[in-house]
Image: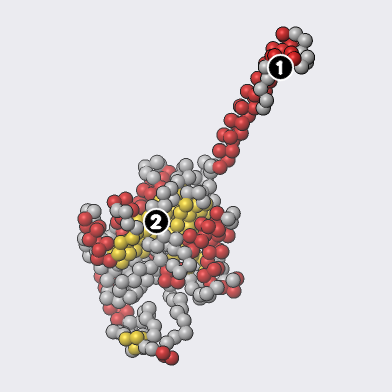
Amino acid sequence: MQSVNAAEVIDRGKIGSVKAIMEEVSGRYCQVVILVLFLFVEGQIFKYGETSTPKSLPVVINTWPFTNATAEAWHVISSDKGSALDAVESGCTVCEMEQCDGTVGFGGSPNEDGETTLDAMIMNGVTHDVGAVGCLKRVKRAISVARSVMEHTSETFLVGDDATQFAVQMGFTNEDLHTNHSWQMWRDWEKNNCQPNFWKDVVPDPHQSCGPYKPVTGEQKSSRPTSHSDIGRQNHDTIGMIVVDRVGNIAAGTSTNGANHKIPGRVGDSPIAGAGAYVDNEVGGAAATGDGDIMMRFLPSFQAVEFMRQGKSPTEAATLALTRIAKYYPKYSGGLVVVNKDGEFGAAAHGWTFFKYSVCNPQLGKVTVYSVQPINSTFV
């Protein structure tokens, strides 16, 4: 806006008296003040419009009806007892200690040697810091070890016995992860000629006998890798959790003991950022469950967040991320839970007869389990 002074007004002959001059200058001044106030208020309204309504935040969402884990994370974040990271860690820890469905925590999913190992990851949407452990042995609180990797090292991912050694240095207890149940699972599997297993293109025939195996060559090889139809809630149902706090800070975490009877040394998708879970404070977050050996090849959690960045809703983002996988592996099984920075949430699944997930926010007032109808591979 052009400045005005009394001399200029008089020279133009527009005002015939000092009183008129003062009235015009005063009027222009008032207009400037009003404009400044308007811009200030407009800016505050715009700023407020970018944040979530009090009814939608905070929010906790996780794969499967692991409602005690959801409730614990909700307690932490809704009562301001900790950050989004604290809530994620606390929620996943509940599942680890409760051995959710036998596929999270100790005493489940023994590998071919009968040993239970754990995978976990935690991610901060503010900084994109990540901590993860894979094939962790003899330490129960995998999600907490993952957080220690994030907070006490400049590394991202530790695995195997070395991850266990790190955990012990950080004060975690070195203890047996076996239970009578897990030992019996392994014995029954061995008596059943080691069926099912994850081997291919080896001799003796892995569909009929146990190892040790040797590779086959040439024309004996199978045409392509396949997904595993027995992956589901009772086999490899990872907890993947996302928490958005009152001011929009986002964190995610995963924890699992992996697939039953996996080959020793196997690490799944859960501890891999972008595969098991992914969060970005500017957009939102996603977490996955299912056939990790297939899903990690497509980074579905990252893809879902990027689809939201392009303007898709959480449900649309989840569906698009999963259908991309089905193009190559039409028989795979997997699910995604997705939430945006405003607290809007959704989910999608493929290959199962059902998929359920748990949510809590101020609108719901309690932990609520939702069920989604999986998309058919012919959708692609």
Neighbour tally class for label 1: few under 14, some 14-19, many 20 plus, Cα within 10 Å: few
Q: How is the image coloured?
A: secondary structure
Q: Nearer the viewer, mark 1 or mark 2?
A: 1
Please tell me whether residue 57 is drawn above or below residue 45 in the rendered image.
Answer: below
Q: Is residue 195 or residue 145 the one in the foreground? A: 145
Q: Quadrant of residue 257?
A: bottom left
Q: Quadrant of residue 132?
A: bottom left
Say if residue 306 shows up in the picture.
yes
x and y, in percent, of residue 198 in the image: 37, 78
> Measured along the vertical axis of the image, is residue 180 above or below residue 315?
below
Seen at 57% across and 71% down, the residue is: 376
Number of residue marks: 2
Report which residue position mark 2 lands on.
Answer: 253
- Label 1 sits on a secondary structure element that is helix
Which residue of the protein is positioned furthest toward the front in this rendering?
A: 11
Q: Left or right: where does residue 200 sit relative to residue 354?
A: left
At a point 48% along the width and 54% down the height, the residue shown is 285
Q: Give the residue drawn at x 78%, y 14%.
A: 13
Indicate which disc, 1 or 2, sits on the residue closer to the N terminus: 1
Q: Is residue 367 left or right of residue 165?
A: right
- Tell me the SS state at disc 2: strand
* Side of 46 relative to 74 (left or right): right
- Percent across and percent down for residue 306 are 53, 57
**At label 2, which amino acid type do we have?**
Gly
Mark identifier at residue 8: 1
* Residue depicted at 54% across the width and 51% down the height: 344
Q: Quadrant of the C terminus?
A: bottom right
Extreme top residue here? 18
The residue closer to the viewer here, 163 or 219, is: 219
